[in-house]
Structure formats: C-alpha cells, structure tokens
Image (tube, rainbow, N blue to C red):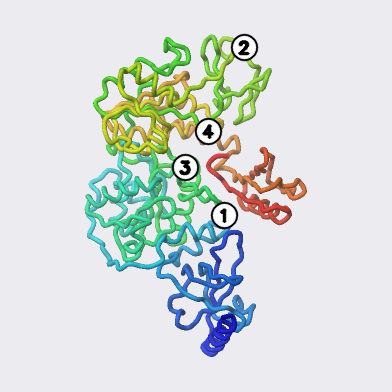
Amino acid sequence: MGAALASRRLQVGREALTNDALVARVVPDVSGIDKQFDYLVPPPLGPRVRPGAVVRVELNGRRVGAWVVAVGAARDPEFSVVSPERLAPILDVADLGVDQSVVPLAGWVASNWAGPLRNVLSSATPQRKRARIAHPRRRAVVNADGHGSTVLARLLEGRGGLLRVPPLGSAMAVVVEASARGPVLVLCPTLRMARLGAAWLRRKGLTTAELPDQVDAAIAGVDVVIGARSAVFAPCDGLSSIVVIDEHEESYHEERVPTWWAPEVAWERGRLLGVPVLMTSPVPSAAAAELCGPAVSMSEASGGWPHIEVVNLLDVPVKGSLLSADLIGAVRAADASVLCILNTKGVARMLACKSCRELQTCDTCRGALQSLGDSLSCPVCHAQKPALCSSCGRTALVNVRAGTARLADELSLAASLPVVEVTASTEGVGAASAVYVGTDALLHRVRTASTVVFLDIDRDLSAPRMTAGREVLAAVARAARIVGKSGRIIIQTRQPEHRVLRALVDGEVDGYLDTDTHLLRAMGLAPFVTVAVLTADGEIPDSAIPDALGVEWSRDDERVIARGADRETVLRFVAEVRAASPVRVRAAVNPPRV
C-alpha cells in the first residue's frame, strides 16, 4: 500500500512538473496545529482548487480535511521552498467551502484577535460539503414606504454607519430599504430572529436564503442572505450592503478563541469589498459608536419605547419579598402570558441594610458592594468604604437572595393561578396563556406576552461590570418587543432613582448612553482600550511576561489580564508571552465580560 502511494506521488509530481506545477498552501483541520503546509495540486483537480476550498490531504499518515489559503505556481518565490516532487498531492476537493473573498478577512480576524486561523475558517465553512442545485431568485424591489429614507440614503451612499432604531420600530425596514440597491447580507443575534426576519421579508416580496441551511441559494443569488453570527462570513452573490441587527447583543461575540466580534468583522468586510455596513440597535454599544461614528436616529414615526412602570420594593410590606401589589394585580388581570424575569446566575452578592433595606452600592459606579470583614469593596472599580449602611449608618447588613423555584411557588399561592418555572428543559413556553418565571433567557424564547415583570432588577443593575446598565437596557428593549405598544413592562427595584431607571421612565435613554460612553472613555475601559485575557493549563510564570511599554497587566486567579490603548501593542505583548511561556497560552482579546 505504501509503495503504491509513493509511486502515485512520483507519477503525479513528474506530470505536474511538465505542466508548470500548481502548489496549494493549506491550513489543516486538526486541533493544536497552527501551521500551514504546501501540497501539490494534481492537474485534474486544478480548476476546483482555489483559496477557500475545502480539501482532503494526507498529514502524518492519516487523511484530514484542510482549507486552501493560497494557490500559486511552484516557480513562484512564495512556493519554491520545497521541490514539487517532494510534495504530497491533494486527494480530493469538496463542492462547498469558504467564499474566496472571505479568506483574507479570516486571516485578519485570526490576527486581530490573536487566535488560530483554523477556528475562523471552521466558523466560515458550510455544514454541508456537497452542493445542491439552486438558481438565482432575485425580484424587483419596491422602495420602503418609509421612515428614515433620507437618513438611510446618506449612509448607504457612504461607508454606512450606526442607526438608533427604538424597540417598537422595525429594523427589518432598514433591510428593505437597503435591498432596493442590491443583495443584502443580514446578521441577527439568534437563529430564531433570523428565521422570523426572513419570513417577514418574504411577506414584503423579497427572496431570502436562511443560513446555515440555504447556503446554495446564497451562492446562486437572492435579495437577502440572513443568518446569525457566523453569517458574517457567508457568500452573497452581488453583495451591495451588510446590515447588522441589534449590534449590542452579546451573542455576536465568538466564545472560543479567537473571540471575534461579528459587527467589527462585518465592518472590515464592508471595507474590503467597498460596500456600506449598517448597524442597528435600540441601545447602541460604545464599541459600535467608536467603530462607526455616533449613532443617528430614524424618524420618530418608526416607533419608540413603551410605557414603563417602576415599583419600589422598599414599599412592599414583607421584608425581602418580591410579591408587590402591582405584580399580583398584573398577573390576575392579564389575558395573555405574563413573563416574570429573575436573574440569579453570574451576578455579585447583594447586601442590604437589615433596618432600612437600602441596597449597598458603590458611589462611583453603582456596582454592588461586597463584604470584606470591616469594610465594603466594589469589585468593579475597587473602591472601599466602612461596613456601614450608606443611608442610615447602621452596621447590620444581610444578603438579599431569592430563587425562581421559590418565587414560582409564592406567586402561585398569592395569585391563585398556576405558575410555570422555566428551565433549559422546559418545552412549549408561550404556547398558551400562562404565568412564567425564569431568567432573562425567557425573553429569547417567547414571541408575544401581555406583561413582562422584572422581579428584582437590582441584581442586574448592580452586577460587577461596567456594562451592567447597558445590559439592563437591552433586556428591557427585548421585553418591549414582546409586549408591543399595548403591553405592560413592570420593573421592581429598591433603587427607583437609579440613573438607568430614570432614563427609561423619562425617555432619556440616549442621554444615559452618551454619559456612560464618556465615563468609559474617562476611566480608560473597553472599547477605548484593548483587553487581553491570557489563560493556560498551568500558571503563566512572571518570567514569561514582558515589561512592555503601553501595556498594563495584572493577575486574576490563574488569569493574566492585560490592557493597552493601542491594539497592536497589546497583540505584540500576547505574542511575546506565548513565545516565552513554557505552557500553551490562550488569549481572549476583548471578550464581552472580563
């Protein structure tokens, strides 16, 4: 068997040499191998081997998949390192691979987020390897009826920009407007939203290709190619613009290394192809504003925020209870589903005064304070204060805790109605009128409801991260879309004067976002600096960490966290740590939560 394979290699190599041999540089689909290798392109496969093609090659005695990242003649200086007759041939080529124009983008992503190119190419590759027959299905598009046409026209004539679309407005109207100029690639935070958006666009007369299943239609040509995060790498024949819906959503961040952010990748793809990129959001992120410029608003006629009721939990007769009269009344009066949201995972412990029930929060950043014996400490900005109530000065402080299971039982007894606690395994959520209790994941699983109640928003407002306020606004925006113009949103809190809640009640969300952006800039936090979180199977020794100008670093348990104003400087720091460390170092650049 080995002799036959060697004979085949020799025969193919000699034949190729007489025909000006082609060489392909590939990235193997093998975990832990970050190198690139050269292979000979057999003449029969030559027309199908291109950058982005998925091929089969032999590596270390076994057949593996690989991606072609470059193709050239053996005589070219770039490929003349090894004599062609010593190269193994490519064995096979798949029908579907990575769009050729995306290969340079994938390299940029791997470099910009300090991760392996293999993982990026894997995200960009269709799940199927064999193509299906598809024909172009483009239709004549009538311009939107609409609102914001002047604003959109200006953005579409340039490089694009950031659009502030309120939660009761329609971001898909932006897609309809953009599609009048040609095919559009649309990114959505979730596959569920992509499916609903595609159905809405088809009702408007547009043809769509839903990813990842309809990649063949995307290649053939449709009006709109739509999908979730990885669709940023998708093929789109005749691409004329890119639209990112709800750019603020955390799901746009890739969790595995490299931790790329889809809106920034979309912006770079638009730059490479010379097409505009539109990003929409009811609560634009500081990162998107830094990338695209300040957000511009659509016409007020396109929607707004619903009426929001704030309930002060300090007025509830029973200490520690979350069952306010407003909550029980809303549950009893509702003629459709009621969603009760309570987050108990991934947040800091909350301290409240046993006497006056005032929450203990940081005077600087409003984060939840934690007890350190004789003092209270803020895990966000590290400010400290004596272990005294900031309102009445007493020293008796207690943890405020509650769980969804207990709350479901209490609410069921109080309202004399069945209450469903929603977990990851709960099926049929929202299929019938009912009262549901769960975390904010519930807001992604239900399409419509009459009322959404945030049982204890303080857990989210006081989370130990600077993005807590924006995360609350994003959750309220999702709730607004669920209840619509005629529904109710009730927010229960012990901090009714919190600046986020005041912004919602007073209709000053934009002002809050501007103030928060200025605060992030003044404190030297992301997105105005680059942050890299370094981890390894073992401890990264101090000797492997360079003293780099422009980079600050510290240890957090087994992690090393570095930050710097210049991204290239931070990336060089990461490369130096990797080169000097005796253990394999993984780097998460600008992860959503640090």
Task: Calculate the distance from the C-alpha at mark 1 to the C-alpha at mark 3.
Answer: 19 Å
Q: Are marks 2 and 3 in contact (CB under 8 Å)?
A: no
- Residue 346, labelled with which disc? 4
Q: Along the polypeptide, which appears first: circle 4 or circle 2?
A: 4
In the image, residue 131 sits, relative to residue 7, either above or below, namely above
Q: Amino acid at mark 4?
A: Gly
The residue indicated by pointer 2 is 395
SS under mark 4: loop
Q: Amino acid at mark 3?
A: Glu
Most foreground residue, 424 or 578 = 424
Nearer the observer, disc 4 or disc 3?
Answer: 4
Q: Along the polypeptide, which appears first: circle 4 or circle 1?
A: 1
Q: Are marks 4 and 2 in contact (CB under 8 Å)?
A: no
SS under mark 3: helix
Q: Which residue lies at the image location 74% right of the left edge and 50% below the top edge?
A: 544
Task: Calculate the distance from the C-alpha at mark 4 to the C-alpha at mark 2.
Answer: 27 Å
Task: Calculate the distance from the C-alpha at mark 1 to the C-alpha at mark 2.
Answer: 49 Å
Q: Amino acid at mark 1?
A: Asn
The residue indicated by pointer 1 is 112
Most foreground residue, 178 or 155 = 178
